[in-house]
Amino acid sequence: MVKKFEISNNIRRLRFFASEMTQQELAEKVGVSRQTIIAIEAGKYSPTLELAFRIADVFGVGIGEVFQCDLKGE
Amino acid sequence: MSYKEKSTLASILSGILILGAYCLYAFQPSRLAALPPGDLKPWAVTMLVFIGIGIGVTIVIQIVFHILLSVGLAVKAAVENQQNADQEIERSLKREMVEDERDKQIELKSMRIGFIVAGIGFVTALLSLVFYGSAVAMLNIMYLSFSVGSLLEGAGQLYYYRRGS
C-alpha cells in the first residue's frame, strides 16, 4: 500500500529571516499570485517541483529546508 | 476575495440570468402553442441566439471588471496620495491578473465537473429520445445540461479558490 505523506513547509519562518519578506514580494519573485503563496504556506496547496525549487532559490536554501514530508502511516 | 473569484462569481450570476431568461422565453405557453410540433429549427435558432448573448455578456463582464478594478486601484492610489500613481496602478493590475499553476489546476479540476455534468446530460438526452421519442426534449436537455455544467464549473472554481486548491 502506498504510504501517505503530509507536506509541511517553513516558508513563514524563512520569510521572517529574509528581512520579513512579504508574501507579495515572494510571489513576485517566483512569478505566482499572492493567493498561491498563502495557500502553500497554509499547506492547502502543494506546489509543482519547479515552483518549489524557485521558492528555495529565493531564500538561497535547499528544497528540503523549505518543504518537509511527514510520514503519516501505512 | 481575489479578482478571479469576483470575476467567476459575476460569470456565474450572468450564466444564471441567461439560463433563466432562456427558460422564461423558450417555455412560455403561448410560444409553445405556436410552434409546430417536432420542428427543431425554431429551437435551434433560439439556442444559437442565447449562446451568442452568453458570449457577448461574458466579454462585457470581463471588460467592466477590468475597468472597475483599474478605477478601484486609481482611487486607492489617490487616497494614499502615492507618488508615481500610474506605475503603481500598472503594477497592482499585473499583480491581480497573474495566472499561475494553481489557477490552471483549479481550472482543470472545475472543468472536469462541467464535462461530467454535460456528459450526464448528453446521455440523459439520448435516453429521453429513445424512451419518449421527442427530439425537442432531447435538444433542450442537451442545452440545459451544458448550461448547468458551465454554472457548476464556475461554482467548482469558487469552491477550489476558497479551499486553497
Image (tube, rainbow, N blue to C red):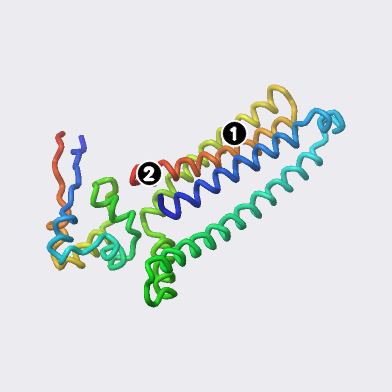
Q: Quadrant of residue B121?
A: top right
**Amino acid type assigned to the residue bearing label 2 in the image:** Arg
Location of residue B58 with respect to A25 vertically, above or below: above
Which element is circle 1 on?
helix
| Residue hosting label 2 | B162
Badge 2 marks a residue whose secondary structure is helix
- Say which of B87 and B44 sits in front: B87
Residue at point 32%, 58% (across, down): A34
Q: Is residue B84 left or right of residue A52?
A: right
Q: In the rendered structure, the residue with mark 1 lies on which chain? A: B
**How far across and down, in percent of the image, does residue B51 sit?**
68, 48
With respect to residue A62, does B133 lie above or below?
above
Whether A7 is drawn above or below B39: the answer is below
- Along the line of sight, which residue is nearer the eye, B6 or B55? B6
**Would you name the residue on which mark 1 appears?**
B121
B68 to the left or right of B18: left
Q: CA distance from mark 2 to mark 1?
A: 27 Å
Tag in front: 2 or 1: 2
Please, which chain is the residue tagged with disc 2 on?
B
- Give how far across and how far down residue B16 sits, in percent: 60, 40
- Residue B20 pos. (x, y %): 66, 37
For label 2, count other residues whose C-alpha is less than 10 Å away and answer few (under 14), some (14-19) or many (20+). few
Amino acid at circle 1: Gly
Q: Residue, x 37% and y 72% (percent of image)?
A: B82
- In percent of width and height, residue B60 lies at 62, 57
Q: Residues within 10 Å of mark 1 (few under 14, many from 20)?
A: many
Most foreground residue, B23 or B38: B23
Name which residue lies at 65% across and 49% down.
B54
Q: Residue at x 80, y 28 (%)?
A: B29
Q: Of callouts 2 and 1, which one flags the residue occurring earlier in the amino acid sequence?
A: 1
